[in-house]
Every structure is written in structure tokens, then in C-alpha cells.
Amino acid sequence: SLEYLENVIIGCTDANACNYDSLANVDDGSCLEDDCNGDCGGSSVEDECGVCNGSGPAENYTCEGMPLEFDYNVSTQVAYYYINSVTIDGAAIDSSDWVGAFNGDICVGARKWNTFFCGNGICDVPVSGNDGSEWTVGYMTSGDIPTFKIYDASNNTYYNAVASADEPWE
């Protein structure tokens, strides 16, 4: 009937949509959502790191900025290994390089090597132990001896490190 047509208001009837039309009583399929920039119906999306319109992590790094091979889970069981110096072919590593601790092939701790933040130039590397959670399977247990690797950020190269002493994890 003609009277019915006069009362039809076409538009977005979804109250959660950014273009909701409170007067509309017939949904026309035009409802939109805000994108990550807050633009109604926009095309911006979050990258894998949760950054709107981001490009993801830097190559060979996690979203948190850690070298991929040095990604590890934090444990409630942690020992700190204090290290006086770290060198590659006799040259001290620089502040963009990393030192990682391993139990076999499992990374159990890592530290970006910036001696500016270390006490008297002696830095520590956290070495996590198995705390019984699913996240720390294969981590250190009492008596295990960690091995260490160096990540040279300028060359994107990992090196096996030789420790001056083998200290068991406790």
C-alpha cells in the first residue's frame, strides 16, 4: 500500500555499526565498521604486531624487537649469568647485538647487549628454567650448563659463543 511505502526508511539498522541510522527501519546492507584508524568503512588493518597500517616485524626479528632465534618464554625459575665481556674475533660487540642462552637448541633467555645499562660494564643474561608449565618444556633444570650464542645485528649473523667457564644452572 502507498501508506506503507511512506513509512519505509532504508539504511543501516545495526546499532553497533559506525554508520548506524537510528531512523532507518529497513536494513539495506550498507552497515560499516571502523577500521583500526577509526575511519568508518576504512581499509586500514593491523599487522601481525598489532600496529595499524604497520609492516610487521623487522626482518629476522619478533614483534618485540628480539632476534627470531632468541625468542623465549619467561619462566618463574630464572638464574642470571653475569658476563664481563662479549667479543667476536677479539672485537667487543656493539649495543645493537644480542647474547642468547640455550639449553640444547631451545633458547631459554636473551639480552640486548647494551653495556650502558649494565652495572660497571658487567651485564647479565637471564637463563630460564623449567617451571612445570607447558611454556618451559626443555628449559634448564638443576645442573644443566647453558650454552650461549651471539647475534651480530649489523651482519644478521649468529655465532656460537665460548664461555670462559661452564657454570651449572641452579
Image (spheres, rainbow, N blue to C red):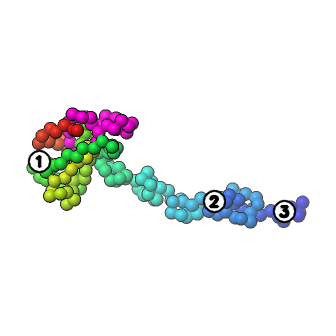
Circle on res. 17: 2
State whether residue 134 is above or below residue 156.
above
Assign the C terminus to one quadrant of the image: top left
**In the rendering, at what x and y percent does residue 84 appear?**
13, 51
Secondary structure state at the residue bearing disc 1 = loop
Q: Are marks 3 and 1 in contact (CB under 8 Å)?
A: no
Residue that appears at 23% across and 56% down: 96
In x, y percent, where is residue 57? Answer: 37, 53
Q: Give the residue type at disc 2.
A: Ala
Q: Is residue 120 magenta?
A: no
Q: Mark 3 or mark 1: which comes first in sequence?
A: 3
Q: Which disc is residue 5 wearing? A: 3
Q: Position of residue 113 (x, y in %)?
A: 21, 53
Decide which of 107, 44 is in the foreground and name it: 107
Badge 3 density bin: few <14, some 14–19, many ≥20, Cα 10 Å: few
Q: Residue at x 22, y 59 (%)?
A: 117
User: In the image, which is nearer the foreground, mark 2 or mark 3?
Assistant: 2
Circle 2: is it few (<14), some (14-19), or many (20+) Cα within 10 Å?
some
The residue tagged with tag 2: helix, strand or loop? Answer: loop
Which mark identifies residue 135? none
Residue at x 15% of width, y 56% of height: 121
- Quarter of the figure that contains the N terminus: bottom right
Would you say residue 152 is visible in this rendering? no
Q: Amino acid at mark 3?
A: Leu
Q: Is residue 35 left or right of residue 75?
A: right
> Label 1, label 2: how many angstroms apart (C-alpha)?
61 Å
**Mark 1 touching mark 2, by CB under 8 A?**
no
Mark 3 to mark 1: distance in Å? 84 Å
- Residue range highlighted in magenta: 128-157
